[in-house]
Amino acid sequence: MMENKNKPFKIILEYIKDLSIETPSASTLLNVRERLGDYHMDIDISTLALKNKSLEVTTKLILQDKNENKEKSFFEIKYATVISIDSSIKDKKMISRIVLCDLQNIIYPKIEKIFISLIKDAGYPGVKFEKKVDFEKMYNDKFN
């Protein structure tokens, strides 16, 4: 658990909610190893209000081939973070910024490290995410 001094929210709990790595056959593994650079990362962030005035934020990463290849692998992780937000914050836009930007900037490096490690251990030693995620830009594109 991480200390959040001077932040308008506190991380209470973090955990892997769901994990899926699907490689149907050895030939798929070999084929995907050759084309792993063609796979695209999608990020989805959702929230669930909990009884104790906290939020469960689920950050989902999906690495997949969006082309019409017959032999594909599929990689997905859902990482949940339970947070409490300072009770003085009522503005929905500020809460959205906390969930979609501020929190993600803290937890994403850990999620990415876990996800890459699991994919490597699943038989894809060359996997790496070259493009860094800019949550500030994603937030601004969505709300400004």
Image (tube, rainbow, N blue to C red):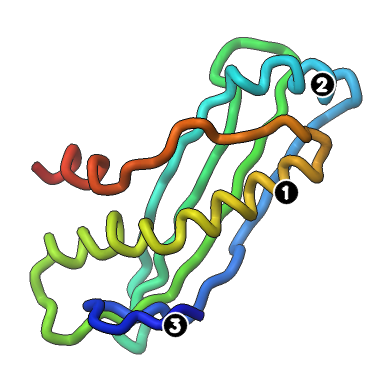
Give me the residue at 41% from left, 82% from top.
3
Is label 1 in a helix, a strand or a loop?
Answer: helix
Q: Which mark is residue 28?
A: 2
Is label 3 in a helix, a strand or a loop?
Answer: strand
- Quadrant of residue 124 within the rendered picture: top right
Q: CA distance from mark 2 to mark 1?
A: 18 Å
**Mark 1, residue position:** 118
Q: Amino acid at mark 2?
A: Thr
**Tag 2 or tag 3, which sits nearer the N-term?**
3
Above or below for 129 versus 98: above
Is 75 or 136 nearer to us in this picture? 136
Farthest-out residue, right: 26
Judge from the rendering whether residue 54 lies leftward or rightward of residue 27; answer left or right.
left
Q: Residues within 10 Å of mark 3 (few under 14, many from 20)?
A: some
Q: Give residue 107's position: percent from left, percent from top.
A: 45, 62
Is 81 or 2 nearer to us in this picture? 2
Q: Amino acid at mark 3?
A: Ile
Is label 2 in a helix, a strand or a loop?
Answer: helix
